[in-house]
């Protein structure tokens, strides 16, 4: 978990503003979208604009990094590429589906590009292929994808 001053300050402000969501044992993760600065910063802006309300990642990556798959209710601080905290999101639904079975409705909720399933598949195929490079794994229609829907519960 990032402990940058920006993340710490945003979490403290969130905890004060939303005591209904934060207790003494509440945990969170802090992260940015994507694997490059331009996309990471664009995607957090889409979240703040209310366009992006979902995200997707390879199950393989969660397993390889020893991270838990998100669960409904999980809280995350979303940052820019630089680490500047921008908002807190709460997972509302999570399902693991094969890449080839991600739906047009999910692609639209993810809100990237033109919102189409075709765009979603092209963009995620490219990103997931980069992610798998050098791992000995390849992306296929059967590759499992963690599809997380979320809501913004606090903005910086």
Image (cartoon, grey):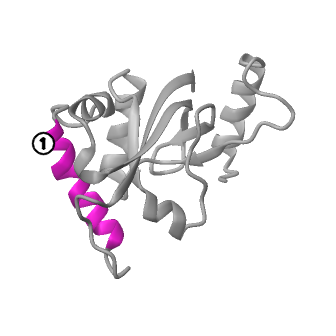
Report helix, strand or loop for mark 1: helix
Identity of the residue drawn at 34% across and 71% down: 132
Task: Tell me where residue 56 appears, x and y as whole percent.
Answer: 38, 46
Question: Which residue lies under the disc numbered 1?
Answer: 118
Question: Is residue 127 magenta-colored?
Answer: yes
How far from the left and from the top, in percent, is residue 59? 45, 58
Q: Is residue 81 rendered to the left or right of residue 9?
A: left
* Nearer to us in this view, 153 or 13: 153
Residue 123 on the magenta span = yes
Residue at the image position 65 percent from the left and 53 percent from the top: 2
Q: Locate the C terminus and report the quarter of the image it occupies.
A: top right
Residue beneath the point at 40% across and 52% down? 57
Q: Quadrant of residue 43?
A: top left
Give residue 15's position: percent from left, percent from top. 75, 26
Tell me where the magenta segment starts and ends, as one range.
Answer: 117-132
- 100 or 41: nearer the viewer: 100
């Amino acid at each position: 978990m990032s402990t940058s001053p920006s993340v710490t300050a945003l979490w403290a402000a969130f905890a004060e503003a939303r005591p209904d969501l934060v207790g003494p044992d509440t945990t969170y993760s802090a992260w940015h979208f994507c694997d490059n600065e331009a996309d990471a910063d664009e995607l957090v802006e889409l979240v703040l604009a209310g366009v992006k309300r979902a995200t997707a990642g390879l199950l393989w990556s969660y397993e390889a990094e020893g991270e838990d798959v998100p669960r409904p209710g999980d809280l995350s601080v979303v940052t820019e590429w630089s680490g500047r905290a921008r908002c807190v999101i709460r997972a509302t639904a999570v399902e693991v589906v094969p890449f080839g079975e991600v739906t047009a409705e999910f692609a639209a909720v993810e809100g990237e590009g033109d919102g189409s399933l075709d765009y979603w598949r092209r963009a995620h195929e490219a990103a997931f292929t980069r992610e798998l490079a050098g791992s000995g794994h390849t992306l296929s229609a059967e590759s499992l994808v963690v599809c997380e829907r979320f809501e913004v519960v606090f903005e910086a």
